[in-house]
């Protein structure tokens, strides 16, 4: 056998090579085909995956979100008062009333919920009064202790917190 047979089928084939070719002939391709154009999908895969992920997130938030049925909704109007969390024996506070967080045995998670505007977290030993001077704007006075207010964008310029040091008017930040 010459080496040319393996490259250009020139010359006489070796009997072993001929036998191998005969054995493999049924597995040979059916001629040369031109490659076909790729199938154009209606939606690329990444868009379909993004839509599916968005649907899953939306369903998850709908079924497992913060809103618990039967739980009272925090009120925004000062006249209706606010919900209090983490203070034994106290579930709400109305205008003119004072919240006093005990120093001993109090959790640091005492919170005053101000509807959809935000919340005020009080440290143990704090004393906070809900003022009744304006029923449209939440107005609080921190007589003693430490408070941290987290107010959302809806509460910008609507939330006020007074203290012996002065008056703070929220401008859309956490302080």
Image (cartoon, grey):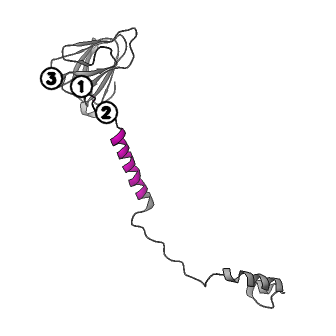
Q: Position of residue 94 (x, y in %)?
A: 20, 18
Which numbered disc, 1 or 3, marks the residue that appears first in the sequence? 3
Q: Position of residue 66 (x, y in %)?
A: 34, 34
Q: Secondary structure at mark 2?
A: loop
Q: Nearer the viewer, residue 107 or 63?
A: 63
| 39 relative to 44, above or below | below
Mark 2: few/some/many CA within 10 Å (<14, 14-19, 20+): few
132 left or right of 58?
Answer: left
Examine the residues drawn in magenta and state their main secondary structure. Answer: helix
Residue, far right: 1
Label 1 sits on a secondary structure element that is loop
Q: CA distance from mark 1 to mark 3?
A: 12 Å
Tell which of 148 and 76 is nearer to you: 76
- Range of residues picked out in magenta: 47-75
Name the residue carrying label 3. 135
Residue topped by disc 2? 68
User: Looking at the image, is mark 3 or mark 2 earlier in the sequence?
Assistant: 2
CA–CA distance in space, label 2 to label 1: 26 Å
Q: Residue at x 31, y 33 (%)?
A: 68
Kindly indicate the quadrant of the structure image that contains residue 114.
top left
Q: Residue at x 75, y 88 (%)?
A: 9
Q: Which image quadrant is residue 164 in?
A: top left
Residue under numbered circle 1: 159
Q: Is residue 113 in the magenta section?
A: no
| Number of residues whose C-alpha sits closer than 10 Å to that of mark 3, classed few (under 14), some (14–19) or many (20 or more) | some
Residue 175 rendering spot, x and y as whole percentages? 34, 24
């Amino acid at each position: 056998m010459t080496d040319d047979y393996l490259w250009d089928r020139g010359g006489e084939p070796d009997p072993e090579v001929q036998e191998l070719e005969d054995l493999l002939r049924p597995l040979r391709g059916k001629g040369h085909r031109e490659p076909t154009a790729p199938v154009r999908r209606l939606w690329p895969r990444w868009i379909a995956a993004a839509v599916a992920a968005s649907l899953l997130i939306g369903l998850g938030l709908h079924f497992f979100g913060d809103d618990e049925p039967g739980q009272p909704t925090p009120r925004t109007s000062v006249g209706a008062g606010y919900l209090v969390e983490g203070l034994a024996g106290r579930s709400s506070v109305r205008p003119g009333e004072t919240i006093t967080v005990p120093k001993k045995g109090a959790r640091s998670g005492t919170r005053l919920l101000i509807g959809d505007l935000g919340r005020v977290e009080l440290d143990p030993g704090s004393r906070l009064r809900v003022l009744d001077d304006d029923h449209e704007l939440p107005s609080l006075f921190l007589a003693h202790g430490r408070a941290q207010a987290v107010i959302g964008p809806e509460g910008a310029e609507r939330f006020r917190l007074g203290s012996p040091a002065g008056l703070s008017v929220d401008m859309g930040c956490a302080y």
